[in-house]
Image: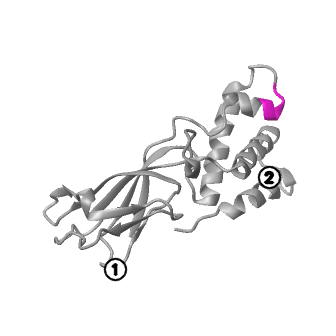
Amino acid sequence: MKTLKIITAATTEPLSLAEAKNHLRVLTNDEDALISVLITAARQWCENFTGRALASQIFEYILDDFPEEDEKIILPMPPLETVDSIKYKDFEETETEWNAVNYIVDDESIPARIALAYGKYFPSYTPYPVNSVRIRFTAGYKEGGDPHLEMPEQINSAIKLLIGHLFENRENVVIGSAANKVPFTVEALLYPYKVNW
């Protein structure tokens, strides 16, 4: 069993309120609250579609146990910023942090992987019956000079298009209306960035 939890949600959106208003051609501040909500909703929809973290967030990936010795742990929600900790819990519910010297983080792969360091092994212990391994990591696109953490322009464009769609179609569902569907262009822009983990 594998579970992914958000520990700390995004505090900064990949698209600012000013950028969204410029895209929507909104000149007043009357709808700032609505547009801010739509920015978050559009980003989250695009995250669900692509399987990527589009803004920096802290996650916890929970496994019942470590994999076999020759397997790697695939981390969800690329791009990976950092692996913050790996902890495991034994049958007596004693939690231990696994020292980072035991593993290598491959953040060049998409999605990122955790592999055993040379000559190292996964911990030998009797695991708690469920959710014994917890990997806390930070992932998401952000500005700051690291090329693999810069959001692709296609994803940025998809978020803008989706915000525009949601802004124009904010009423309840109308049966048979094209307004009920996410525009094909949004999915077409995002499709090359879909990740299966």
Asked if the residue under mark 1 is in contact with the one under mark 2, i.e. CB atoms within 8 Å, the reply is: no
Image quadrant where residue 177 sits: bottom right
Nearer-the-camera pick, 45 or 174: 45
112 in magenta? no
- Position of the N terminus by quadrant: bottom left
> Residue 151: image x %, image y %?
63, 48
Q: Mark 1 — residue?
A: 70
Q: Residue at x 81, y 58 (%)?
A: 184
Q: Residue at x 60, y 56 (%)?
A: 48
Q: Does residue 96 appear left or right of residue 168 in this picture?
A: left
> Residue 50: image x %, image y %?
63, 59
* Mark 2 vs mark 1: in front: 1
* Magenta highlight: main SS: helix
Task: Give neighbour class at mark 1: few <14, some 14-19, many 20+ (Cα, 10 Å).
Answer: few
Q: Residue furthest right?
A: 177
Task: Give neighbour class at mark 2: few <14, some 14-19, many 20+ (Cα, 10 Å).
Answer: some
User: Compared with residue 143, is residue 185 higher up or lower down, i.e. above or below?
Assistant: below
Q: Secondary structure at mark 1?
A: loop
Nearer-the-camera pick, 1 or 151: 151
> Residue 42: image x %, image y %?
67, 45
Give residue 162's mark.
Answer: none
Q: Secondary structure at mark 2?
A: helix
What is the magenta range? 22-26
> Residue 38: image x %, image y %?
68, 38
Q: Earlier in the sequence, mark 2 or mark 1?
A: 1
Disc 2 residue type?
Asn
**Label 2, label 1: how many angstroms apart (C-alpha)?**
47 Å
Q: Does residue 138 appear left or right of residue 92 in this picture?
A: right
Nearer-the-camera pick, 89 or 140: 140
Q: Does residue 157 appear left or right of residue 51 in this picture?
A: right
Q: Mark 2 — residue?
A: 180
